[in-house]
Image (cartoon, grey):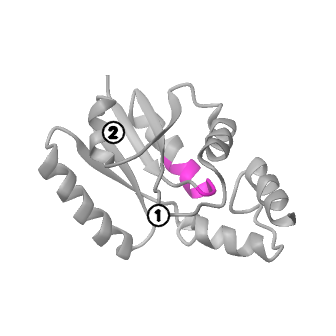
Amino acid sequence: MRIAVYAGSFDPVTFGHLDVIERAAVLFDRVIVAIGRHPAKHPLFAPDERAALLHNVTSHLANVEIDSFDGLLIDYAQRKKATAIVRGLRAATDFEYELQIAHANADMCPQIDTVFLPTRVERGFVSASLVREIASHGGDVSRYVPAPVAVALTKRYAK
């Protein structure tokens, strides 16, 4: 079975993330969308909230599951018996950073490949931090995130 792990903070999940998930679901038998938990970061949404949003927007994909992890992604991927780590790329600067991590992961575990999926042109500029910034000022983010995420952002910033 070809198992891929697509990890990120998904704070919040965007249409760009969803595009990568959907494309990975075609390429692999099973895709684990893994929410990374970092003690030094202070996310807008708690891990269980991000998981619920991801479950909601990926429910149409039978071979996608949502999970979370602490520590190194490569260790998590090994525990899950993954054959690949999927990474989305928006720009050339993403590639330089992601390639360095891919090389380190390959050094630690050469059995797991990294697969880069470039974002679609119309999603190339969208990032979770941009979405949070727009939403924090009451802007409409409905063209950048799925409807349940837009609702969650509106509620969060209304507080």
Give the residue at x 55% y 53%.
17
Circle 2 residue: 76
Circle 1 residue: 40
Q: Quadrant of the N terminus?
A: top left
Is 140 on the left or on the right of 84, as rendered? right
Is 74 on the left or on the right of 36, as rendered? left
Is 74 on the left or on the right of 15, as rendered? left
Sequence-first tag of 1 and 2: 1
Give the residue at x 66% y 54%.
45
Judged from the image, the secondary structure of the residue bearing numbered disc 1 is loop
Q: The magenta stretch spans which residues?
A: 11-20
Give the residue at x 43% y 48%.
7
Please identify the quarter of the rendering in which residue 93 is found.
Answer: bottom left
Judged from the image, the secondary structure of the residue bearing numbered disc 2 is helix
Residue 28 x/y as whole percent: 39, 32
> Contact, CB < 8 Å: mark 1 with mark 2?
no
What amino acid does circle 2 point to?
Tyr
**Tally of numbered tags:** 2
Residue 77 x/y as whole percent: 31, 38
The answer to if 19 sits in the magenta stretch is: yes
Q: Residue furthest top?
A: 1
Nearer to us in this view, 116 or 127:
127
